[in-house]
Amino acid sequence: MGKKVPITEEQRRLSYAKYYDQDMAPVPSDKLALLETPMDPAKALNIHDRNRLFDEGYMDVETGYCVMEDGSGYIANHTKMPGVTVDMFDWWFAWHGLGDLRYTIWDPEDHYGACSMNLAQGRSLKLSLKEKYWGTTHLITEDIGGGPDELYACFKKPSEMGFDEEKIGTKACGTIVTANSGIRRDPGASAEVMCHFVRETENGIELRSRFWLGWHIIGGKPVKILPDEEVTPLIKPKMLLAHNMKEFTNLARLLPQIYPEQKDNWD
């Protein structure tokens, strides 16, 4: 078990602080083994083809990382979440940006905090779960492998990110959480597109995450931010995949516990 990030005495008194004290759920060994060798870039999902996620079945590689031919980075991560519903997943992204400890309990070893810049929107009782986080920006402090850093995540409506929204809420896809994100001190060099594509299963949901490093989606179309002469260091997608495995393995266990207790807590 790793060292946990510090929290305050005031945070200790919050109703969900008990989840900070839980041990992290272990990442399955077969997934950790996939970090040893990068995947074949030819089997990566090109950002221009992201609507292929709606297709039935699975892609050749659902968990892996690589550097693409154009120098950009790529990550795929498949996480099974038994006992988790689509609403729980949307709720989490609406809820966790309303207070730093909410983000910390997701991964107490790496998440220092996150705060939505749109708190009134997130707390509104008139909006759906999705509408609470669509169009919001979260300012995040976390350690992805190189020490704590300040990040941003600009969450968007899936149609604004070029996804076929008519297929969301069908058998093909329960929801999509997607954002343009990066590191605040160097937003150009760290630009990435994040996509968490959720599909219902017999006993919960499965999460098919994709990250395209060096890109943002602007006006519904991919725009390569990484200069053509630059190449993403392989360690960057590798570290991000390791972090993603860790945090979502833990979230898969946390959500069925915390949702019944906190689902109406928008303070």
Image: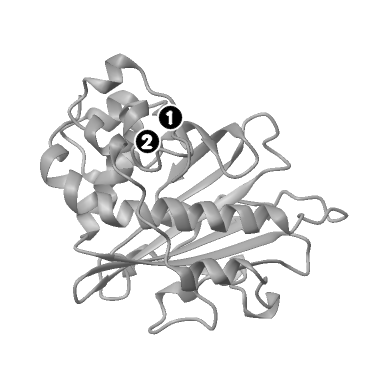
**Badge 2: few (under 14), some or many (20 or more) residues near its Cα, within 10 Å?**
many
Label 1 secondary element: strand
Residue at 21% from the left image edge and 24% from the top image edge:
14
Residue nearer the viewer, 255 or 211 = 255
From the top left corner, tell me how far across and down residue 212 is, in percent.
61, 58
Decide if residue 213 is in sight here. Answer: no
Check residue 113 in the rendering and tell me which mark sits there, or answer none.
1
**Badge 1: few (under 14), some or many (20 or more) residues near its Cα, within 10 Å?**
many
Residue at 43% from the left image edge and 61% from the top image edge:
27
Say what amino acid the circle numbered 2 marks.
Answer: Tyr
From the top left corner, tell me how far across and down residue 84 is, in percent.
22, 60
From the top left corner, tell me how far across and down residue 224 is, in percent.
71, 54
Decide if residue 136 is in sight here. Answer: yes
Q: Are marks 1 and 2 in contact (CB under 8 Å)?
A: yes
**Which quadrant: the C terminus?**
top left
Check residue 103 in the rendering and tell me which mark sits there, or answer none.
2
Residue nearer the viewer, 127 or 33 = 33
> Residue extending furthest top?
10
| Res 253 → quadrant | bottom left
